[in-house]
Image (cartoon, helix red, strand yellow):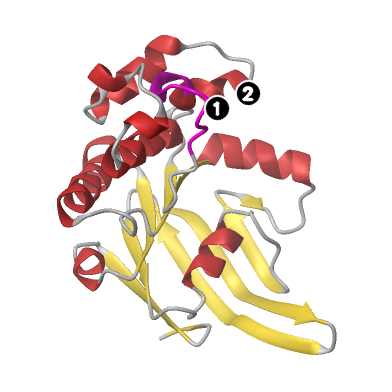
Amino acid sequence: MTIMRAVELGKTYRDGERETEVLRGINLEIKKGEFVAIAGPSGSGKSTLLGLLAGLDKPTTGHVFIGENEITSLGENKLAKIRGKMLGFVFQSFNLIPTLTALENVELPLLLNGISEPKRAKELLDLVGLSHRNKHYPTQLSGGEQQRVAIARALVCEPPIILADEPTGNLDSKNSQIIKDLLFRLCQDQEKTVLVVTHDLEFAKQAQRIIHINDGQIQ
């Protein structure tokens, strides 16, 4: 079953009269429960593609489908509802709120939707092995711990799709492996669809499928 699809996707950035074509003619399908890596050299368009698939940016040409929803023509309110229901995000820079504890960071997406479920947030911190750190602030956590909090936060609304942009890029080898193992476990044990942008070819080779991007096209 296809859970995400791109059709003739293109992205061009304009600066005055100058145009930079970042992506062109991207066609791909992501199946439910797949672990897919998007790999390619720096500047190839990997992160741009992930942003378009997530609806964080609008394509210049083409269409993106999440489930049965064509998202490129949607207004921000409808798009936000689909993102909140279908997608969990993990970023290279963690994006935790420094004034909130680990537990509060994980629970935040629920609170923004008018839901108070600290028990759910605690369960997810336990899942990522950080139940003993739930009252710590981001500055009191290592990079690897912050990324695990970010993954717990991505899971709290129970989305079927996890999108991760260079999730191990700021981590040492030990913490990188912890995050990789956690993402693979989410795919295998919870049947999450995981789409990861990475420059780490060894990481990419462990995925079920690799999408190679170069010069804005799938190779």
Work out whether residue 88 or residue 170 is closer to the camera in this orientation and state it: 170
**Quadrant of the image occupied by residue 130:** top left
x 35%, y 37%: residue: 146
Hey, what amino acid is under mark 1?
A: Pro
Describe the element under mark 1 as helix, strand or loop: helix
Q: Position of residue 12 (x, y in %)?
A: 70, 79
x 28%, y 21%: residue: 133
x 50%, y 66%: residue: 47
173 vs 65, left or right, is left
The residue where tag 1 is placed is 109
What stretch of residues is rendered in magenta? 96-104
**Quadrant of the image occupied by residue 156:** top left
The residue where tag 2 is placed is 112
Numbered circles on residues, count? 2
Work out whether residue 160 or residue 12 is closer to the camera in this orientation and state it: 12
Hey, what amino acid is under mark 2?
A: Leu
